[in-house]
Amino acid sequence: MSERRQSPFRFETAVLLLAVLTLTAACGWSGWDTKMTTVIPKSDFGKLTHGVFMLISWWTLWIFILVEAALLFAVWRFRERPGAPIPKQIHGHTALEISWTVAFAVILLIIGIPTIRVIFKTQEAPAATALRVDVTGRQWWWEFKYPALNVATANEAHIPVGQTIAFHLNGPDVIHSFWVPQLGGKRDVIPGRVNRLVLTPDTPGEYIGQCAEYCGTSHANMRFRVIVHSKEDFERWVAGQQAPAAEPKEPLAQKGKELFGQSACVGCHTIAGISAGVLGPNLTHFGSRKTFAGGMMPSTAENLVTWIENPGGMKAGVLMPNLGMKGEQSQALAAYLLSLK
Ligand code: CUA
């Protein structure tokens, strides 16, 4: 072959450059700041693990660039040329092999030591001053209890900013996983043992959580929220949750209260002063929650009526039975539940 060949690199280089530019433009740093991000952490735990993630990412990036550059250089420098002799053939190079083995061992240590430190740090026992929150993962919703405060709620955990929180994770049925990406950490909820997740949130806000271990039909619907309050707002929330169940004022809600007391609802749900069921969420302050059904549905009268009349239609596999409530019955129950602020 005598004619000059087109360089094969022009097309690939252009595609690569375009891909990098597109990614850079699409993912400006603010683009990462989404509800499920792990790269803008809002707690000490999140920052620790993010630090390890970034350390590993940067080292991986530089090694990738170095290896690819060496590869491209070798391909270009020793490419086949018409009439050129075959380059000198070599096999092995002791000094080179020792040096890159040592270099990569050192890089592994640089990555490994901080990783192990973070693993131990994030497994430490919580300080005595930590606020304990007992988390129960169930098919398919989350229960949050505050033993020191005598508060029980569902699907929405409220915690104060700057305070160390010790989540104690347990569950009665199958394995779930407690994960609030922005607060960092993801820890399995395993029947028969108590796992712990200790973190100190540093920014008030509402953070989305999601069960991160497949746990059956409605795994994807097993959501929750963690609301990080200022100290004052948290105290206000606790006071509200510790108050007795509100007495309904509207006639429809009063009818709902009566109906609740007479129906099978009482077998599964607690409303302080009325019932003591433990299979479903505690409803004493249901009206103070923004969502229900594993954090899936906004707490509106319309959604509640649909839910009461056919729970399985909203959430596949749900354990709450259809009690055959219709029309004014379900409307009355919904009104009553929403009145429980
Ligand atoms: Cu619980 Cu997936």
Image (spheres, rainbow, N blue to C red):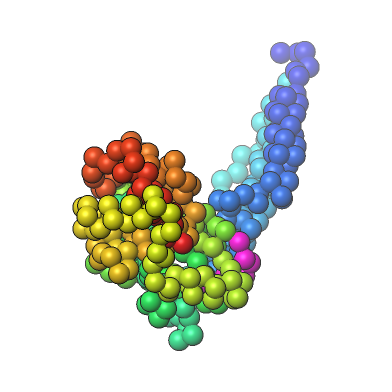
In terms of image quadrants, where is residue 148?
A: bottom left
Q: Residue at x 27, y 41 (%)?
A: 325
Q: Residue at x 37, y 44 (%)?
A: 331
Q: Quadrant of the N terminus?
A: top right
Q: Nearer the viewer, residue 128 or 140?
A: 140
Q: Nearer the viewer, residue 71 or 289?
A: 289
Q: Nearer the viewer, residue 143 or 311?
A: 311
Q: Residue furthest bottom?
A: 128
Does residue 166 lie above or below 26 as drawn? below
Instruction: State yes or no: residue 313 in magenta.
Output: no
Image location of residue 130, percent across then percent down: 48, 80
Image location of residue 115, percent across then percent down: 52, 68
User: Can residue 24 be spotted in the picture?
Assistant: yes
Q: Is residue 236 left or right of residue 143?
A: right
Q: Is residue 55 left or right of residue 212?
A: right
User: Can residue 316 be spotted in the picture?
Assistant: no
Q: Is residue 75 left or right of residue 118?
A: right
Image location of residue 198, percent across then percent down: 47, 73
Span colored in magenta: 199-205
Q: Residue at x 43, y 59 (%)?
A: 249
Chief secondary structure of the magenta portion: loop
Q: Residue at x 36, y 55 (%)?
A: 254
Q: Nearer the viewer, residue 299 or 255?
A: 255
Image location of residue 139, percent across then percent down: 30, 52
